Image (cartoon, helix red, strand yellow):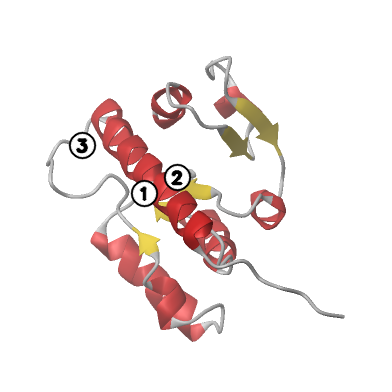
Amino acid sequence: ALAASLALLPIHVEVVETRADALEGMPETVETRLTPMPEAVVREARAGSAFAILTHDHALDFLIVAEALKRDDAAYVGMIGSKTKKATFKNWFLKSDEGSEAQFNRLVSPIGGNAVKDKRPPVIAALAAAEIMTALVSHAVQASAAPAKAMAG
């Protein structure tokens, strides 16, 4: 549902998955990538990318989120889940020396906000798509307003 919502927006959407069957039926405009190591794709992503993590496995979610939070240039890092899942991730993230409190505070979870109490996938997808688009635009504006860096050799 999230891929379908994002596919309507003027952005490049890529769905990264560890299971081939989960990539079936994606909208034509959505790029798909099958990989056993989705965290490696996070490392390769362009600066200013948004990462929405919603896998079938909490441990995999945590691995991908940790990698995305290491990216200071990410426009958005969001994870589907509950307050309990977020607290569990925080405990693991900080105790495992994966990252800092400041990095953790950049995590949006659950995705889609909590203003609308509707758990249907298309509703969450629409809310998350709006949240992601807002973050992408905000990040682009901030990046264009940043002073140019001069290099001297």
Amino acid of disc 2 = Leu
Q: Are marks 2 and 1 in contact (CB under 8 Å)?
A: yes
For mark 1, what is the residue? 80
**Amino acid type, residue under disc 3 in the picture:** Lys
**Mark 3 or 2, nearer chain start:** 2
For marks 2 and 1, the one nearer the N-term is: 2
Q: Is residue 116 left or right of residue 92?
A: left
* Element type at mark 2: loop
Residue under numbered circle 3: 119
Q: Secondary structure at mark 1?
A: loop
Give coordinates of residue 43: x percent, y percent: 69, 58
Asked if 84 appears above or below 129 in the picture, the reply is below
Whether 131 is drawn above or below 40: the answer is: above
| x and y percentages locating residue 38 in the rendered image | 65, 49
For image coordinates 39% across by 51% down, the residue present is 138
Give me the disc on residue 152.
none
Q: Which three-letter amino acid code belongs to the residue tagged 1?
A: Ile
Q: Residue at x 68, y 34 (%)?
A: 33
Say which residue label 2 marks. 54
Residue 92 visible somewhere in the drawing: no
Q: Report the residue at 43% width, 22% height from top.
A: 4
- The spot of residue 99 in percent (x, y) is 52, 79
